[in-house]
Every structure is written in C-alpha cells, then in structure tokens.
Image (cartoon, rainbow, N blue to C red):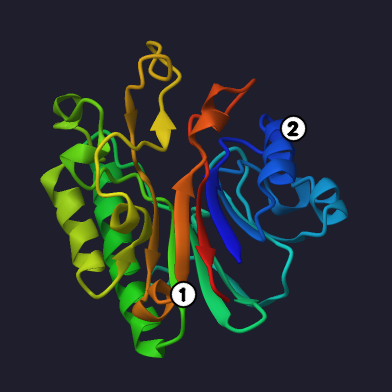
Amino acid sequence: MKIATFNINGIKARHAALLDWLDEAQPDVALLQEIKSVDEGFPREPFEERGYNVETHGQKGFNGVAILSKLPLEDVTRGLPGDDEDEQARWIEATVVGETHALRLCGLYLPNGNPAPGPKYDYKMAWMERLEARARALLADEMPAMMAGDYNVIPQAEDAAKPEAWTEDALYLPQTRAAFRRILNLGFTEAFRTRHPEPGHYSFWDYQAGAWQRNNGIRIDHILLTPQAADLMRDVQIDRDIRGRDKPSDHVPVWVDMAC
C-alpha cells in the first residue's frame, strides 16, 4: 500500500499538476494539505474517475485537508480533538482497509506559527499539545496508525540547507523542535529519517530567491508511524523532481510503502 502526503498549495491552482503526479506515481492513498477550498468546491470528479474515494475537510481560501483513497475508508473524522472552538481545517483521519491490515491514517496541516513570539505561535504550540494527546491515544489503541502531513517543523539542522537562516523562525525554534521530539519519543518512528539519515533531503523550497534552483530547501513534511505501523514499512521516499515542473507546489510528495 503506497501512501503519500502532499501539501498541494491550492487544489484549484495545482489541479492539473496533482492529477499528473497521481497518474505517474499511482499512490493507493494521498493525504493532501492546503486544499484551500470548501468541501463543496473540491473538484471530486477527476479523482473519482481515477478510482479514488474522496474525503475532505475544507475551509474557504485557507488550510484544508483531504484524503484520496483507492481503498475503502471507514470511520472518517474531521478536526483535531481537544478544542471545540478551533475552526481551522487542519486534521482529517480515517481507517483504510488493506488486504492484510487496516491502518488508521491521520492527515495533518500543522500551524506555521510565524511571527514568533505572538498569538500565531501560541496557537501552534497549543495545537502541538493537542497533537501529542491524540498521538498518545493512537498508541493506546495498538493498531497500525500514522500521522502524516505538513508539520511545519524542521526537526534538526540536517533538515535545512541553511539552518542558520531559520534560527528565529517558528519552524525551527527550540520549543517547536522539543514539542516534535516529545511526540516522537512516545514511541513513533519518523519514517523518512529512519531510512535516510544523511543530510540534504528536503520537501519544501520557497518560491522566492531561486530556492529551488539553489537547492535551498527544508524538510518539513513528515510521516510518523506507531510501532505496529513501523513494522509494516517497506520503503519511504521523497518525489523531489516534482518541484521542477510547471506551476508546482512549493512542497513535494513524501510517500511510504506499507506491507498491508
């Protein structure tokens, strides 16, 4: 089962590019972030024609997450637990049913948090506390599960081409990285770094200042696996070259192959 996470930076702006990638990469499941569309405005038909079930949690003009799955989805829920007043569409989860295992999928778009300090950073840190609580619950369930998406976290210096440029940024502040490590240290496997410990791997290149051309990237799109899911992991890669195509997102897909 090939499962990808992809911040597409607007379903309407990247519609053609997303379809091209789906046709080429053929993921069984794609977790999307920043669809920037209300649910009823999401262009479902081209994806359904390709055999995907479509579940969305949208918001006008901002945020928004979705799941595209060629396999059956069960028990779809929307919104990260812990704050009933949070109206930002940043979390969707469902159980995908494979041939040998069912897998709980959580697609997330973690807040950016800039400028920091400030209310946006406070929101980011509160959101990460709620994420940790949900992570603990997933572990307690003892079923294969993953939390995948745009974390807006640069975990360590090796995850940035120029880490010194990010020292005051919400993505790389010590408090941000510590919150991420607290979740990892509960017992999760960070899929990509486990298989690719060397530096130089990125999933985001800014549109500004020729970042792609100079390979001035950062790695902020992550797949976290429970122990039961980590046992099923066969491969994990970044589809880096997508960034160099016409009208790309500033992110590229990260995918994991699971034996389920």
Along the viewing direction, whichever of 181 and 212 lies nearer the viewer: 212
Q: Is residue 117 visible?
A: no
Residue 249 location in percent, x, y? 55, 30
Q: Which residue is mark 2?
A: 16
Q: Which residue is pictured at 45% across the width and 68% down the height?
A: 233
Residue 149 to residue 71: above or below: above
Q: Is residue 31 left or right of residue 11?
A: left
Q: Quadrant of the N terminus?
A: bottom right
Task: Find the residue positioned furthest to the bottom.
Answer: 141
Task: Find the residue positioned furthest to the top.
Answer: 209
Residue 19, picture quadrant: top right
Q: Which residue is mark 1?
A: 232
Q: Which residue is pictured at 59% across the width and 60% down the height?
A: 2
Residue 172 location in percent, x, y? 20, 40
Residue 195 location in percent, x, y? 33, 56
Which label was assigned to residue 104?
A: none
Q: Which residue is pictured at 63% across the width and 43% down the height?
A: 60
Q: Amino acid at mark 1?
A: Leu
Q: CA distance from mark 1 to mark 2?
A: 32 Å
| Secondary structure at numbered mark 2 | helix
